[in-house]
Image: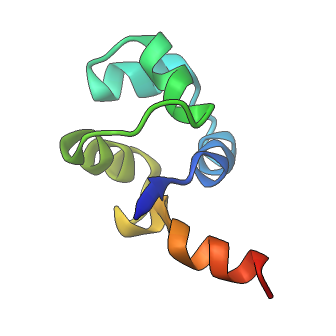
Amino acid sequence: MFIFNCKKAKELMESKSIDQQDMAVALDCSEGFVSGLLNGNKQPSSDAACRISKLLGVSVDSLFEDTNEMLANRNH
């Protein structure tokens, strides 16, 4: 299973001086939804993930983490 990497998104946003309001406008959604994404409480739709990747200048797949891989790394 893949989950949105909110830590990476926050780091990219900071490096590009993009705030939650900018992301909300780019996604055509509320700042509350963006807050949920960045706090790990929400997952973006495929369309939203594409918009986020364009806004942040990265590939869509780089915005997600494989939870199976994360669990395997914790057990070693």
Left or right position of 63 against 12: left
Please identify the residue farthest to the left as the structure is shown: 47
Q: Residue at x 53, y 66 (%)?
A: 67
Q: Give above or below for 20 relative to 74.
A: above
The number of callouts visible is 0
Q: The N terminus lies in which quarter of the figure?
A: bottom left
Q: Give above or below for 38 relative to 75.
A: above
Q: Residue at x 32, y 28 (%)?
A: 26
Q: Quadrant of residue 70?
A: bottom right
Q: Position of residue 14 (x, y in %)?
A: 68, 41
Q: Nearer the viewer, residue 19 or 36?
A: 36
Left or right position of 42 against 8: left
Q: Give above or below for 5 relative to 69.
A: above
Left or right position of 37 against 52: right
Please say which color scheme the image uses: rainbow
Q: The C terminus lies in which quarter of the figure?
A: bottom right
Q: Position of residue 43 (x, y in %)?
A: 40, 39
Left or right position of 73 against 61: right
Please identify the residue farthest to the front as the structure is shown: 75
Q: Residue at x 55, y 53 (%)?
A: 5
Please identify the residue farthest to the bottom as the structure is shown: 76
Q: Quadrant of residue 27?
A: top left
Q: Residue at x 25, y 40 (%)?
A: 45
Q: Position of residue 59 (x, y in %)?
A: 37, 66
Q: Quadrant of residue 35?
A: top right
